[in-house]
Image (cartoon, coloured by chain):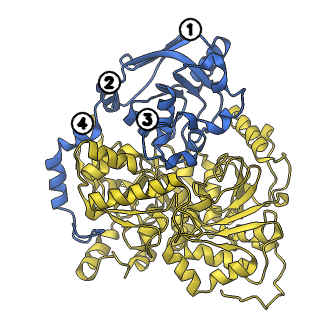
Amino acid sequence: MEAFTTHTGRAVPLRRSNVDTDQIIPAHWLKKVTRDGFEDGLFEAWRKDEEFVLNRPERAGATVLVAGPDFGTGSSREHAVWALQNYGFKTVISSRFADIFRGNSLKNGLLTVVLPQETVDALWELTEADPTVEVTVDLVARKVLAPGVEAPFELDENARWRLLEGLDDISITLRHEDDIAAYEANRPSFKPRTQAA
Amino acid sequence: MARTLAEKVWDDHVVRRAEGEPDLLFIDLHLLHEVTSPQAFDGLRKNGRQVRRTDLTIATEDHNTPTLDIDKPIADPVSRTQLETLRKNCADFGVRLHPLGDVEQGVVHVVGPQLGLTQPGMTVVCGDSHTSTHGAFGALAFGIGTSQVEHVLATQTLPMTPFRTMAITVNGELPEGVTAKDLILAVIARIGTGGGQGYVLEYRGEAIEKLSMEARMTVCNMSIEAGARAGMIAPDDTTFAYLRGRDHAPEGADWDAAVAYWRTLRTDDDAVFDREVVIDAAELSPFVTWGTNPGQGAPLSASVPDPASFDNPSERLAAEKALEYMGLTAGQPLREVAVDTVFVGSCTNGRIEDLRSAAEVLSGRRVADGVRMLVVPGSVRVALQAVEEGLDKVFTAAGAEWRHAGCSMCLGMNPDQLAPGERSASTSNRNFEGRQGKGGRTHLVSPQVAAATAVVGRLAAPADLTEVTDVTTPAGV
């Protein structure tokens, strides 16, 4: 995983709540067996509308998505995270994220930042009034910065450490191989098996 | 210390606990399907890793499979590649697979319980959010992303931060004609699509205890639609009776040991939940959604709400956008909403009891002119059972299409989709924009409401139908 320390970029204000994973990446894109090439599927239905914020020329190259509450609800498809990253987003700000989406994002180095809705409102107003405004998401200092905005955010210390270091979960877990083997040795015999080991 | 059901199951699976780190949990059962696993197997290959416990892993094909002409090569080359990739991955890594055409093939969340692989007190994961279904057995079951699929394949564990716990207590008895689906839709409308975020829900109370295992699965299945990763119901005699004799259920002394353990899996009397919601079953009635998220629902007897009636500005805006997308007007009675398509199936409502109840409504009746009805059994086993009971004949005699098992129109990945502007009454779990096909409009309903809607052509409950007079149609049920 790519490490995330701090990022500065222009923003896309997405004034919608409950942006579900079917909107982020529709199901027909899920037939692909790779982790890349999902950028054209990102918000595919909404992008048919020329006026959709992502289609506005002034938003080209923006890397910070500022969305309404309950972003990423619905399915567990990690393709939603890949689509956002493939398109070029480095971080998503919202007042509330769906659990599975949040977990997926942090495992891929897409930083999802939870800020109070008032701060999200302020970022929307700021970046709608001036699309050239840059927003900084600083994971080291755990702060979001923009002109007139200085907002601290919370992130579980362990998740933050893994993001800052760009660490792969599996390698960390495999350091505890002995613990896993010890647990396995004590599992009750009535637990089902799908086939002989 | 007094503990809830979820906490007991969690504690029994902790492989490693350290200050400032997530708990490392052992996973008892890992279910795989074609859509969320290819990139995980790629990751294993890239790092030279194996599947640690092929004996705790099982795969089936469901999301992307056709429900017609399954004996022919799959027309869409991209879909075909995805299924071939799963077959190759399972062969290369030694994973048991039930492919299209196999008698144990079906929707992953129908297959696991049906084989007896889902049991009380287990941890069950799958790269699919509706893994919460398995919580009906008192298992801690949750959906995971592809990175976590790879993690479980490699280590049979997951690092997890503990959930908070929420009790959903449903007191009293469900009135006649009110189903598990109506109940869970009402719960989601009550707590909202984000209400369960960070929680494991435990459904309890008299109305829950009286539900069959299949009805309990319907309830737990949609926990994710309330934002919760998992939903659970304490195992009881109903659970044990369902399990006994299934392929992978314990036998002999193992059965006795298992039941003795399973009986301990109840929330202690003095345990405290982080949040409690109480619902009176007697107040519930057939429930349908009117909007584009599963929390936007109302009793069938109600009208489409006025967005102005929502105090929360974000909910008001969401309601305005939903009505526009759904082509509905505030104040329109829900019973007047006409549909083009009716879908009975999915991991929510694709089990034999669901098919029986839809068939009971359709028996001796006809699907309304201009309405297309698809009945897609949740698994091949469900389909075979339905055929044995003559349900397939009831469906086809009524003018419905009887299809092969799979996820089908629930997510519209295969060719079973709505056309732009088309409207469905669907027994599935998500009414998101375009979920069942680009521009399609979805109303979530129970199998009974789906069948009655098919007959009337507008959203309807069985109680709205006139008595059957045509006795020439095979009854079948």
Give the structural element (helix, strand or loop) at label 2. Answer: helix
* Chain coloured yellow: B
| Three-letter code for the amino acid on which mark 3 is drawn | Ser
Give the structural element (helix, strand or loop) at label 3. Answer: helix
Closest to the observer: A143 or B78? B78
Cα distance between the residues tagged 4 and 3 = 24 Å
Location of residue B222 in the rendering, given as x and y in whole percent from the top left corner: 55, 56
| Three-letter code for the amino acid on which mark 2 is drawn | Leu
Closest to the observer: A12 or A48? A48
Q: Which residue is mark 4?
A: B19
Q: Which residue is mark 3?
A: A105
Mark 3–mark 1 CB contact (< 8 Å): no
Location of residue B201 in the rendering, given as x and y in whole percent from the top left corner: 48, 54
Tell me, for residue A164, which label it has, or none.
2
| Quarter location, residue B23 | top left
Mark 4–mark 1 CB contact (< 8 Å): no
Q: Chain of mark 4?
A: B
Q: Which residue is mark 1?
A: A148
Is B280 placed left or right of B74 in the picture?
Answer: right
For the residues beneath circles 2 and 4, the answer to whether they share a chain is no
Q: Earlier in the sequence, mark 3 or mark 2?
A: 3
| Point 40% across, 73% down: residue | B115
* Chain coloured blue: A
Comparing labels 4 and 1, the label whose residue is closer to the camera = 1
Location of residue B317 in the rendering, given as x and y in whole percent from the top left corner: 73, 34
For the residues beneath circles 4 and 3, the answer to whether they share a chain is no
